[in-house]
Image (cartoon, coloured by chain):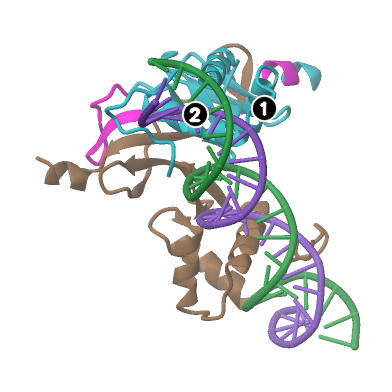
Chain colours: A cyan, B brown, C purple, D green
Amino acid sequence: MSAAPASSLRPRGTRQREVIGRLLQAAEGPLDVPELHRRALGELPKLGVATVYRTLKLLQEQGAAHMVTLDGENLYEASGRGHHHHFSCRACQRVFTLHTCPVALPAGTIYPGGFVVEAHEVTLYGVCPECAKNSL
Amino acid sequence: MSAAPASSLRPRGTRQREVIGRLLQAAEGPLDVPELHRRALGELPKLGVATVYRTLKLLQEQGAAHMVTLDGENLYEASGRGHHHHFSCRACQRVFTLHTCPVALPAGTIYPGGFVVEAHEVTLYGVCPECAKNSL
DNA sequence: GTGGGTGCAAACAATTTGCAACAGC
DNA sequence: GCTGTTGCAAATTGTTTGCACCCAC
């Protein structure tokens, strides 16, 4: 292991971390690593995938980003943009972010059977507005 | 490609498919590939992982099984056991099957924004009844 | 100046595929 | 017997790690 700074050390501010973090923030939805890397290459032509992975791991440890898995594919998105869920369009394959939540399960809710709910994740599958229109 | 039978051909009934399918049906919850393989080895000592993967793909194409991803890990479960969701216990790591659904989104529902919902998936995270009791 | 960070390539892990032997139908 | 299926190993794909050089502090 060479990266992983001990918790007592503060990570340095580097250009690659700044760029990767910013791109994640600016993204319309969760991105997969190849896509994130591709976008970052625009500003840092020498950037290696390894750095993308290392930075994502760092961001996750800091709670600034997190991973979502959709259809077996790992995607990353910036945290702190409020409670939301995802919609996966089976026509165009894109993943959208939904800001309305279809469940009422505040943390601490006791679910039937005695399950203490601390968080929930919802993914909707179907056809996005755009594709629905095109298939009419 | 050597497996993937054309849609016009019906898959043969082999012992490995029977066993894998039966184990999936009998499972208490979704299983990962190594675990499914391990269980199957009890009846088919020569079974290779490749066959497990190939059979799972076949079962998924037939709609008899499907994959769920939890915490980045791919698990498989038999279909047709009714609408249900999953609960992941952060204490014991186990995955439970929940038979009550916290959302009201029948297929065909139009979600705010114009998203046509065909299916949904919900995963709850927290502490299972057993672990909750032990931590009191 | 020094220790963490980065790029690159090799190492790993998970899943897929080629191929010859084998088994349903 | 013909054709799909399996086991094994090699090949892929996605992700992590070792290491020498570089840069933020």
* Residue B94 position in % (x across, y down): 33, 50
Q: Quadrant of the N terminus of chain B?
A: bottom right
Determine whether, in the image, residue B92 is placed left or right of residue A120: left
Residue B52, picture quadrant:
bottom right
* Residue A132 position in % (x across, y down): 73, 20
Task: Judge the density around disc 1: few (<14), some (14-19), many (≥20) Cα neighbours within 10 Å.
Answer: few
Q: Residue at x 65, y 62 (%)?
A: B54
Q: Residue at x 83, y 60 (%)?
A: B8
Residue A48, picture quadrant:
top right
Amino acid bearing label 2: Thr
Residue A106 in view of the camera: yes
Q: Nearer the viewer, residue A131 or A84?
A: A84
Relative vertical location of residue D17 with respect to residue A106 in this rendering, above or below: below
| A53 within the magenta span | no
Disc 2 or 1, which lies upstream in sequence? 1
Q: CA distance from mark 2 to mark 1?
A: 15 Å
Magenta segment boundaries in residue numbering? A105-131
Amino acid bearing label 1: Lys
Q: Chain of mark 2?
A: A
Q: Nearer the viewer, residue A126 or B68?
A: B68
* Residue B135 position in % (x across, y down): 13, 42
Report which residue position mark 1 lands on. Answer: A46
- Disc on res. A55: 2
| A114 within the magenta span | yes
Q: Residue at x 53, y 79 (%)?
A: B44
Q: Chain of mark 1?
A: A
